[in-house]
Each structure stands twice: as C-alpha cells, then as structure tokens.
Image (cartoon, grey):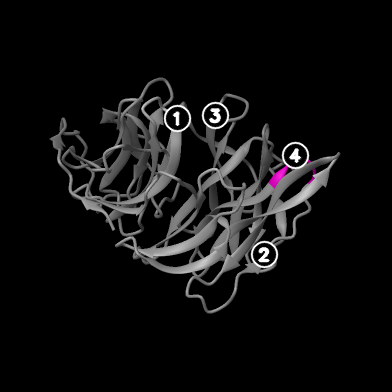
Amino acid sequence: MNRRHIGVVSVAIVALLALTSTASATIVYQSSSNSRLMIASDNSTGATRLGATGSAPLISPDGTRIAYLGGTIKRPQLRIRAIATGVEVVAAVVPGTSVGFGAVWAPDSAHLAVPTESATSKGYITGAGLDIVDAVTGAVTVVLAPKGHDIGGFSWAPTADRLAYASQRYGATFGSHTLRIVGLDGAVISSLGAGTSPLWGPTRIVFQRYTSVRWHGMRLQHTQLWTVDPSGAAVPAQLTHYASVGMIYGPFATVWSPDGTMLYGGIGGDEVSIPGRINATTGRYTRLRDATGKGMYDARPVAISADGKTLLLDTGEISGTPVYRTMPAGNGALHVFLKHAYSLTVQPSWQP
C-alpha cells in the first residue's frame, strides 16, 4: 500500500447554491459549448453553474460533492468540490502519474476509485493503474501502480468497503485480464479468475469474458457475460450465449436494475451502439425499442431511476449530436431529457 496525503487544499469561489445532503436528488453535467460544470434538478430543470470548469463531472451518491477533472491537458487533476461551500481538494496522486477519465464514487460517498496513467517524458503511455481517493482529504491509496499494468474496469461493492477490478500486464494478449477484489487499504481479498469490465450488483458481479470467432477469414474477439458471487461461494457462471455476428460485439452491461433482476447495456461495434436489456437469471438479451417498435442504433444506457421504471440513455454520440433521453425500462416512447450536455451523472435516488 502506498498512501500519500494531499499537499494542496484550495478554496474556490463559493457557489451560490442552497443544496445540501438533505435536498432532493440532483444531476451534474458539462456544458457542451464550453467546460462549465452545471448542476440541475432531477428533471433537468433549474440548471445552475457550479462555479468551476473542467470535464467528466461526477455527483456523489449523497449529493454533497462533485468530483471532476481539472488542471491542464498535460497535468489533469481530480478535484473534489463540496457543493455547499465551494471548498475543493485535489487528489494527491503519486508523482509521475496522472488521473484519467472514468472515476467512480463509492456508494457511501466517502471514496472514489480513480484510474491513473504513467508515461515517458515524451508522452508515451507506459501503463494504467487504479487508486482509491479519500473524498474529504484527497489522500490516495494505490491499488495498482500504472507502470507495466493495464486496467479493464472496476466497480464498488454496494457496502462501499470493497472494490472489484480487472487488470493485466501492459501489452499482454488482448482480454487476458484477471478479476480481483480489494479492500479500502488496497490489499487483495480474493481473485475471481479471468474477466474484465466488472459491474457489481445487489448480490452478484457481472463481467465479460472474451471469446474468439472466425468471420470471413478473420479472427475476431467477441464477449459473453458471466456472473459470480463475490463471496466466492460458487464458481463463475456464464450468463449470456448471444450469437454475435461479424464486427458486432457484446453483449455488455452498464446498469443493474435496483432489484438485481435485470441488466441494461447492449451490443455494438465501431459505428453502432444498440441498447438492450439482459435477464439476470436466464441471460436472454432483448433489444430496446421505442413506442413504434423501432430499435435504436446509437444509444447507451447510463442510469436507471430509483424505482426501476425509467432508463436514462446517452443517444446520438456516434452521429455527433449527443442528447440524453429517457424511456420506460421495458420499451416505450423516448423523451428528450437534456440537450447540449456531456458526461451527465445522476444520484442513485434519481427520479425524473
């Protein structure tokens, strides 16, 4: 374990927001026209500037803090801002490493899991690692040093005391990741075998394992979803048996339903993203369709409402006109939720 304490605490301009941990749930996003960070109500109304600029904002589950990437392109920083006061701390990553996109809040809002990178003096990447960052102090626990390693996804336990992640040697054969569970001190608790892209649900972890197929003389890497009991009480079990064709990959999972009975994700390729749902018991994959029965080709589920009835989708990213939309968690009419936004995140209590 490598633990360092924050060296800089900066006090930013106090945001004139009457938001506290007892307020209704909120959303946060980056304005697409600039790097301004915005905060708004559950139904996307009442948007207000947060008083900071950056990218990839993440609202904490309790609604009291925003984590985002600030600094410069060459020296990005993970900044954690208290909404009520505007006070910020900067994650004290080990010198020689930088933070990357894709941080994830722990369910209790006390820590973040943060991807890191190392590079040569000329900017050539030498690996990707993982840190746990204390949300109050910015102190860092290194789970996996970046140099010589590669990260294939990570996810918090619902109890916020454990973290699942996938890693392999940097430059190793594609898809040779191993899944591990660590505690808040970064120490390995257990190894779950081969797999990547873990997503921790109410009782199980779903993850991907790569398969190899031949198509028109080419060998392609496809994937299937597997699940595992994080306690180690049973061996991993294959969930899906989806017959992917050609350059279409998947299925992948991005969201668990609150009751753990359904997964939402999709299949996709270089120029297509087809959203769908996966029965968490049978593994059956079903494509999501709008009110007319038409399937979508450019959408990705990013969140589900607390009652499990409404999906939030990022649509139009491939076409170049991203718009967030909502739809029933089964099938049904799509409704525009928010335009001109990037990296929108919601609290688990989100109810549009």
Amino acid type indicated by mark 1: Tyr
> Which element carries disc 1, helix, strand or loop?
loop
Residue that mark 3 sits on:
322
Q: Earlier in the sequence, mark 2 or mark 1?
A: 1
Badge 3: residue crowd in 10 Å (few <14, some 14–19, many ≥20): some
Q: Is residue 212 visible?
A: yes
Report if residue 247 lies within the magenta region: yes
Q: Amino acid at mark 4?
A: Met
Task: Read off the residue under disc 1.
Answer: 124
- Mark sitting on residue 91: none
Q: Which residue position is annotated with label 2? A: 239
Q: Which residues are magenta?
A: 245-249
* Three-letter code, disc 2: Leu
- Residue 247 shows which numbered tag? 4
**Which of the two residues, 283 or 339, is positioned nearer the viewer here?**
283
Distance between the Cα atoms at labels 3 and 2?
31 Å
Q: Which mark is in front, 4 or 3? A: 4
